[in-house]
Amino acid sequence: MGSLVQPITARGVFTPRFVLPNELTAYGLPDYKRQPNILALVDAASVLIDSYCGRVDGYGQGSLVYSTYMERLIMQSRNRNVVRLSFKPLVVVDQTTVNLLTASANYLPTNPQTGKQQTGSTLEFTNYFWTGVQANTQVANNVPGSTISPIIGASGRYGVTVRRSDYMIYPDLNYGMNPLMIASFFGGPPGWTPIQLSMSDFDPQTGEIWVPAGLYLSQYTEIIVVYNAGFHPLYLPPQIKHATVLLIRNFLSRGGGTSGLRSISTAGAANISFTEDLIDTTIERILMPFKNLVAY
């Protein structure tokens, strides 16, 4: 891939926290004085929602908040240079926002019980805002109303398919295989080449991207895309916050999240009832627009 697609920056320690300490009372949750482990329950609910919504990739990275993803995709549609990314919505994160989130990740928190700032290495503390997201800098010339692309970098390579009817030829010109395709006949995988992002198009809501043609107007067989997706950690959609609050209440009412115990009856023979899942049907309906299916 050369230097085109940079490896994703080390994440450090990140834990999602979808309800902030100053929002507990507003959402009807107990504060740390009434429930000492309330923030731990908030974190547990946030992690569970991220997992349920399919926001964590195969490397264990990603969240509903701003995250940088790297995907390797096959251009499966013959004679169509369109592919769909897994995580949505695609979003542009500028350097100022990255600096703000990074500063929050390196901030030494204040102990809520003593009111004093905790001391020690910042690596000892968990940050709730910066996932390691990188800033977007690539120009998007072909997208109305946007000057910066949510795609950080992309590269593609050519290959020779098995069936003659499935040659990956750019639809605007049935020219034939270029030299990089022919090179694969002599052994080894073909090399990766840069994709001109200023000539690409994208839909931030569906995750669909239009990939420009490569050498000799040939279509890529597979591509690697590094891009940003998610929501600002300080301005999450209210649905996510309400779903988190409902899940926390389920934790509190069902053994603090350590069991699915629903009720115990001691009249006559003991009768113990358990819940099917802490994420009930109400939470499922709220999170449906944010749910994502990722197959590996």
Image (cartoon, grey):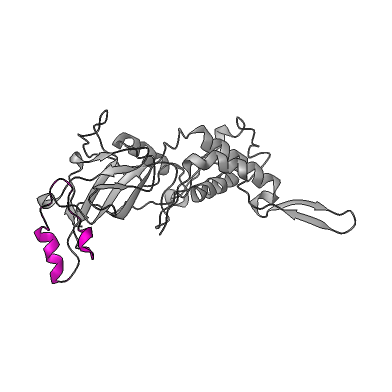
Which residue: 64% across, 51% down?
A: 257
Q: Quadrant of residue 247?
A: top right
Split into 4 quadrants, where in the image is the N terminus? Answer: bottom left
Q: Is residue 206 left or right of residue 210?
A: right
Residue 176, magenta (yes or no): yes
What is the x, y in percent for residue 148? 25, 35
Split into 4 quadrants, where in the image is the C terminus? Answer: bottom left
Which residue: 19% across, 39% down?
A: 198
Q: Is residue 164 above or below residue 225?
A: below
Extreme residue in the right direction: 268
What is the x, y in percent for residue 117? 50, 40
Choose between 192 and 103: the one closer to the eye. 192
What is the x, y in percent for residue 31? 63, 37
What's the magenta region?
161-187
Choose between 49 and 102: the one closer to the eye. 49
Q: Is residue 182 left or right of residue 259?
A: left
Let me know if residue 20 appears in the view.
no
What is the x, y in percent for residue 212? 19, 45
Which residue: 55% across, 32% down?
A: 22
Choose between 110 and 48: the one closer to the eye. 48
Which residue: 63% across, 40% down?
A: 32
Q: Quadrant of residue 164?
A: bottom left
Q: Is residue 144 left or right of residue 243?
A: left
Q: Quadrant of residue 100?
A: top left
Residue 172, magenta (yes or no): yes
